[in-house]
């Protein structure tokens, strides 16, 4: 079995004269959660739609679960759970009717107890017509239909859009549980905190180009920290500022300094042991701050 659930090479897509995707290269390993992060209009939805043959690319190749979407779209859709960014449902049907309809399309593969379990966790009323649902409740219907047949791969386009914070956390727990059961999860988002919470790796797309693919933990590890030190007495600690990766940002007074530290903290802490320290605070740069550099086009950061 191929170790990758998704392999995309040189994907190009035009809308008229506008080039939406500029040779996207991307792979998702089987059993991982891959966050697809980028601002609105970066190409996230276009990439996902090409994976399902909902739109046709002008260049490049795609393999989903070892299949070519353009040659075998039905076979892929039978094994994939999909939540579109803009979900359209029959307003006169109830959630229960929607789920029964999708279950028939998929050959009655879903266990109804499991559908009810997912619905209960999301506090979704099954017998209320969709036309009476809020945007958030419609989104819950979309989440359940994507997961209810226990697919091998789920492709989710902004899965927590419109949900309140408690329900956002519940959806993320569902994705983590799906991964525990061997499911590959590929989800696009512009909400960086949720990507940081569950994704093993992150792919960043900007203006139709992949600008970074990395493990979430490694991105955070290489990020900057701000360190505030308060000494017990006036102290000249010039050697601290000369350590590799350490930069003096400000001196509060004779007792305090603010440093920026890149990389490992070991050398700073060992050197600091020589000094009478009253207080030591550290704050890591967030994933959001790291990716803002990409969004602003400052890739060299």
Image: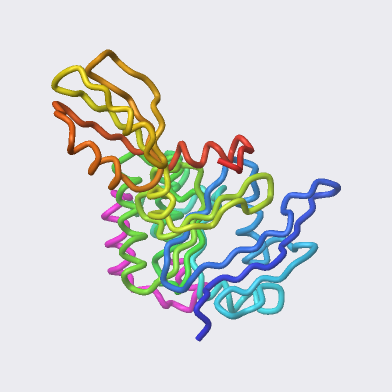
| Number of numbered discs on residues | 0
Q: Residue at x 49, y 57 (%)?
A: 214
Single out the residue that lies furthest toward the right: 17
The residue stretch that appears in magenta: 99-124
Q: Is residue 107 magenta?
A: yes
Judge whether residue 113 is colored magenta. Answer: yes
Is residue 95 visible in the rendered image? The answer is: yes
Q: Quadrant of residue 49?
A: bottom right
Give the residue drawn at x 75%, y 62%: 57
State left or right for residue 214 relative to residue 10: left
**Would you place residue 254 above or below residue 202 in this image?**
above
Q: Estimate the x, y position of residue 266 in percent, counting from the top left.
A: 28, 47
Q: Residue at x 36, y 60 (%)?
A: 175
Q: Residue at x 37, y 39 (%)?
A: 243
Residue 157, horizontal then vertical, whole percent:
53, 52
| Main SS, magenta residues | helix
Q: Nearer the viewer, residue 267 or 258?
A: 267
Question: From this viewpoint, is residue 157 visible?
Answer: no
The answer to which of 1 and 82 lies nearer the viewer is 1
> In the image, residue 145 lies at what x, y percent?
44, 61
Q: Nearer the viewer, residue 208 or 105?
A: 208
Residue that protrudes farthest toward the bottom in the picture = 1
């Amino acid at each position: 079995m191929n170790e990758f659930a998704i392999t995309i090479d040189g994907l190009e897509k035009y809308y008229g004269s506008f080039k939406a995707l500029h040779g996207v290269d991307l792979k998702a390993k089987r059993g991982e959660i891959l966050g697809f992060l980028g601002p609105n209009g970066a190409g996230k939805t276009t990439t996902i739609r090409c994976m399902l043959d909902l739109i046709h690319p002008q260049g490049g190749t795609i393999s989903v679960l070892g299949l070519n979407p353009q040659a075998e779209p039905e076979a892929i859709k039978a094994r994939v759970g999909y939540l579109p960014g803009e979900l359209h449902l029959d307003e006169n049907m109830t959630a229960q009717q929607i789920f029964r309809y999708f279950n028939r399309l998929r050959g009655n593969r879903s266990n109804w107890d499991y559908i009810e379990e997912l619905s209960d966790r999301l506090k979704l009323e099954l017998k209320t017509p969709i036309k009476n649902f809020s945007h958030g409740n419609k989104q819950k219907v979309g989440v359940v239909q994507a997961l209810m047949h226990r697919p091998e791969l789920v492709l989710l386009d902004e899965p927590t859009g419109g949900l309140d914070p408690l329900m956002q956390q519940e959806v993320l727990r569902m994705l983590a549980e799906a991964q525990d059961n061997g499911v590959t999860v590929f989800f696009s988002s512009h909400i960086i905190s949720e990507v940081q919470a569950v994704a093993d790796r992150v792919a960043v797309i900007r203006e139709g180009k992949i600008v970074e693919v990395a493990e979430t933990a490694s991105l955070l590890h290489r990020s900057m920290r701000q360190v505030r030190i308060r000494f017990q007495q006036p102290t000249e600690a010039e050697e601290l500022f000369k350590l590799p990766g350490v930069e003096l940002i400000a001196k509060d007074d004779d007792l305090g300094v603010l440093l920026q530290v890149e990389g490992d903290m070991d050398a700073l802490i060992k050197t600091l042991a020589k000094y009478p320290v009253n207080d030591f605070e550290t704050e890591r740069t967030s994933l959001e701050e790291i990716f803002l550099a990409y969004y602003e086009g400052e890739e060299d950061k």
